[in-house]
Amino acid sequence: MESERSRAGHLAALLDSHIVTQLIASAVRFKIPDQLAGRTLTEEQLSGATGIGVPVLRRYLRALQGLGLVEEVGAAQYRGTALADLLRSDSGSSTDIH
């Protein structure tokens, strides 16, 4: 029989997967993969392009870093990764979440 601890762990995994899905979907909605395609932007530039305030954007970009979608390449400068390229609107990938 499944223990309560095991059930709690399963529930936590389900909740985490929902959060990850929302982080990725919002990155696509805000066109972050498109904005960072082949270039590096500062937090301020990305804030202007997305309409997300810098303090919130900074935390959000850290979450996207944890997922492997963006990388910080300098002080407050970010670029997309190969994984983020799959989420670009012009990627032609089969993710089709645009």
Image (tube, rainbow, N blue to C red):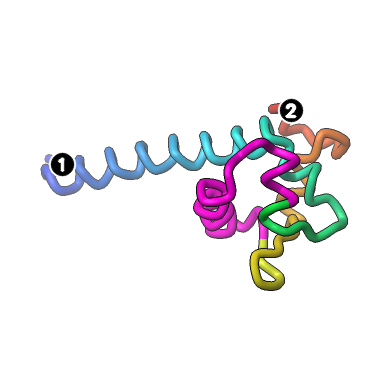
Residue 67 seen in the current view: no
Circle 1 packing at 10 Å, graded few (<14), some (14-19), many (20+), is few
Taking 41 as reference, is 63 left or right? left
Q: What are the residue bounds of the magenta stretch?
A: 45-70
- The x, y position of residue 25, in whole percent, is 60, 33
Would you say 93 lies left or right of 48 here? right
In which quarter of the view is residue 62 placed?
bottom right
Disc 2: CA contacts within 10 A as few (<14), some (14-19) or many (>=20): few
Residue name at image x 67 percent, y 55 percent: 43
Mark 1 or 2, nearer chain start = 1
Residue 98, quarter of picture: top right
The amino acid on which the numbered mark 2 sits, given as a three-letter code, is Asp
Quadrant holding the N terminus: top left
Characterize the magenta stretch by its predominant secondary structure.
helix
Position of residue 14 measured from the top left corner of the image (x, y, whole percent): 36, 37
The residue under label 2 is: 96
The answer to whether residue 7 is seen in the rendering is: yes
- Amino acid at the residue labelled 1: Glu
Q: Whole-percent x and y of residue 42?
A: 72, 59
Q: Which residue is mark 1?
A: 2
Q: CA distance from mark 1 to mark 2?
A: 37 Å
Image point 75% across, 51% down: which residue? 45
Q: Nearer the viewer, residue 13 or 89?
A: 89
| Label 1–label 2 contact, CB within 8 A | no
The residue tagged with tag 1: helix, strand or loop?
A: loop
Q: Nearer the viewer, residue 16 or 46?
A: 46
Numbered disc 2: secondary structure: loop
Instruction: Identify which residue is drawn at 83% across, 50% down.
Output: 37
